[in-house]
Image (tube, rainbow, N blue to C red):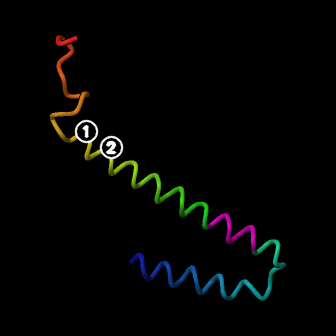
Amino acid sequence: MIENLKRTIWATAVKLRPNMDPAEYKRLVLGSIFGRYVSDTFQAKGTAMTARLAGPADESHRSQSGR
């Protein structure tokens, strides 16, 4: 499904390119790249946090009475 979506987005970008001003196209492409970066970073941080919190050795799993 993701590969199909990537192909569709790429095909749309190729169709838009000749009909747009280069500056407008640049903003569209750079915005898409930034959105992808933010999405990937958010997913990586979420995965790392989930893995960290899953382990009983983590500080968040320690008893409050031990302080």
* Residue shown at 60% from the left, 67% from the top: 33
In the image, taking residue 57 as reference, residue 42 lies left or right, namely right
* Residue shown at 61% from the left, 61% from the top: 34
* Residue 42: % across, % down: 45, 52
In the image, taking residue 31 as reference, residue 41 lies left or right, namely left
Q: Which residue is mark 1?
A: 53
Does 47 sit above or below residue 56? below
User: What's the amino acid at mark 1?
Assistant: Leu
Secondary structure of the residue carrying tag 2 is helix
Magenta stretch contains residue 10: no
In the image, taking residue 52 as reference, residue 1 lies left or right, namely right
Secondary structure mostly taken by the magenta-highlighted segment of the chain: helix
Of the pair 26 and 9, the residue shown nearer to us: 26
* Residue shown at 48% from the left, 78% from the top: 5
* Residue shown at 17% from the left, 13% from the top: 66
Circles 2, 1 touching at the beta carbon (< 8 Å): yes
Badge 1, how many Cα within 10 Å: few under 14, some, many 20+?
few
**Quadrant in which the C terminus appears:** top left
Q: Please report the bounds of the magenta region as a residue range.
A: 26-32
* Residue 11: % across, % down: 59, 87
* Residue 61: % across, % down: 20, 28
Point out which mark residue 7 bears. Answer: none
Name the image quarter holding residue 28: bottom right
Secondary structure of the residue carrying tag 1 is helix
Name the image quarter holding residue 56: top left
Q: Which residue is mark 2?
A: 49
Of the pair 58 and 28, the residue shown nearer to us: 58
User: What's the amino acid at mark 2?
Assistant: Met
User: Disc 2 to disc 1, how far (Cα)?
Assistant: 6 Å
Magenta stretch contains residue 30: yes
